[in-house]
Image: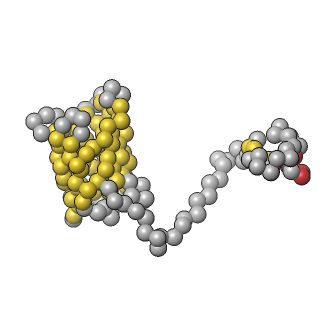
Amino acid sequence: MYPSGPWLGFWEQTYWGHQAMRDLVLHFGDGHVDGPGIDIVGRFNFKGHYDHAGNVVLIKLYLGRHQVLYTGRYDGEGTIFGEWSIGELWRGPFALRPKNFTVPATVGIVSIAAEPPMGVESAKVKTGHGADAAGPCGPTDDPLDPPQLS
């Protein structure tokens, strides 16, 4: 599921903002993951586990400092998204992905369809031409004018 090798990552915290993880190399095998990296706080090692459903739990141990819990899930497109936390008060989002990740050309396109929640009428697209021309969007003669939602 996860490739071993160089990875890219970031975490966010209110005071520190968006922070990149550099020189991150993760090794995956038999449900276990580990690897070193560095960020604005300092050098660290990840150690943790993952399952076949895509769940990942990591402990980020800063050398000679504190540790951070990372819990995330594979998004199915190459990235692990989740939340880091230090105790009950400190938390924020994170993301990890393989450095050289690309989707193979042989992977088919998946069709995604969404339906509005029950009791909510879907928006109608007004093109500005023909029967759709009336209404709050009004008519238009410009063929480059994008459709309007009402």
* Residue at the image point whose x is 26% and y is 56% from the top: 6
Asked where in the image residue 49 lies, by quadrant, the reply is bottom left
Look at the picture and state if 106 lies above or below 42: below
Residue 33 percent location from the top left of the image:
22, 56
Look at the picture and state if 1 lies above or below 147: below
Residue 70 percent location from the top left of the image:
28, 44
Residue 3 percent location from the top left of the image:
29, 63
Horizontal arrangement in the rendering, residue 120 relative to residue 96 (left or right) = right
Observer-nearest of 11 and 140? 140
Quadrant that contains the N terminus: bottom left
Look at the picture and state if 32 lies above or below 91: below
The reply to whether residue 101 is visible in this rendering is yes
Residue 5 percent location from the top left of the image:
24, 60
Observer-nearest of 64 and 50? 64
The reply to whether residue 121 is visible in this rendering is no
* Residue at the image point whose x is 21% and y is 42% from the top: 38
Asked where in the image residue 85 lies, by quadrant, the reply is top left
Quadrant that contains the C terminus: top right
Horizontal arrangement in the rendering, residue 100 relative to residue 5 (left or right) = right
* Residue at the image point whose x is 86% and y is 47% from the top: 141
